[in-house]
Amino acid sequence: MEIIDATILAKVKFVTLFGVSYLDRKGRIRCWHMVSRGEQPKCITGERRRPDAAIIVPYHRRANKLVVIKEYRIPVGGYQHGFPAGLLDPGEELAAAAGRELREETGLALVSVYRHSPAIFSSAGITDEAIAMVFVEVDGTPSIRHNTDSEDIEVFLMGRQEVQELLGRDGIVFGARAWLVMDAFARMGQAYLVGN
């Protein structure tokens, strides 16, 4: 398998659709359609280490609760339970992006970063978008006053039992990474979040 080149098929704010030419295992030229947040896809640039976005997993230590958001997501056509998230600005450090997005979406302040993942890919069949999971301690009172008009978010502080009950409810839509983190938190508690 070998990447040959990438051609822009459509470009809009935040994403570009590419046709990527590649050689399959038998040496035949094929085309794969994919979306990227970059000017060129990572399969061309080779840059796979810097995440495009951060997903913030906030733990409110004083309240001893996980911070979960319920947000209207256009592609789902409804509300999804998950965590605050957002794109990194050019040159922005991961912790700075996490603090900015956390404040914008929940009104909470980042106190410290417990740990974070490397750049990880969750839908490599359609996009090269890489995210980093950032596990943080937060403080303050939840507020949505910094939300933009295109955001519809509710903020919840949830203990282990409340998270377990949420996971068991029918009809709830979850982000994939959020479901995995909430499941681990419901089973292991704070130790999972802080990495102990």
Image (cartoon, grey):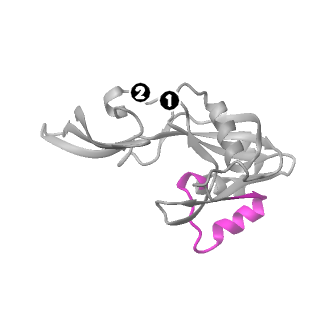
Residue 10, image x and y in percent? 29, 44
Residue 38, image x and y in percent? 40, 34
- Please state which amino acid type lies under the numbered disc 1: Arg
Q: Which residue is mark 1?
A: 50
Q: Which residue is mark 2?
A: 47
Element type where label 1 sits in the image:
loop
Q: Quadrant of residue 102?
A: top right
37 horizontally vs 27: left or right: right
- The residues bearing labels 2 and 1 have C-alpha atoms spaced at a distance of 7 Å
Front residue (pair 94, 167): 94
Identify the magenta region.
154-178
Q: Residue at horizontal 36%, vertical 44%?
A: 35
Q: Residue at horizontal 49%, vertical 66%?
A: 77
User: Is 169 covered by the magenta stretch?
Assistant: yes
137 horizontally vs 37: left or right: right
Residue farthest to the right, as pictured? 62
Q: Quadrant of residue 154?
A: bottom right
User: Is 55 covered by the magenta stretch?
Assistant: no
Q: Residue at horizontal 51%, vertical 34%?
A: 51
Q: Is residue 186 above or below residue 40?
A: below
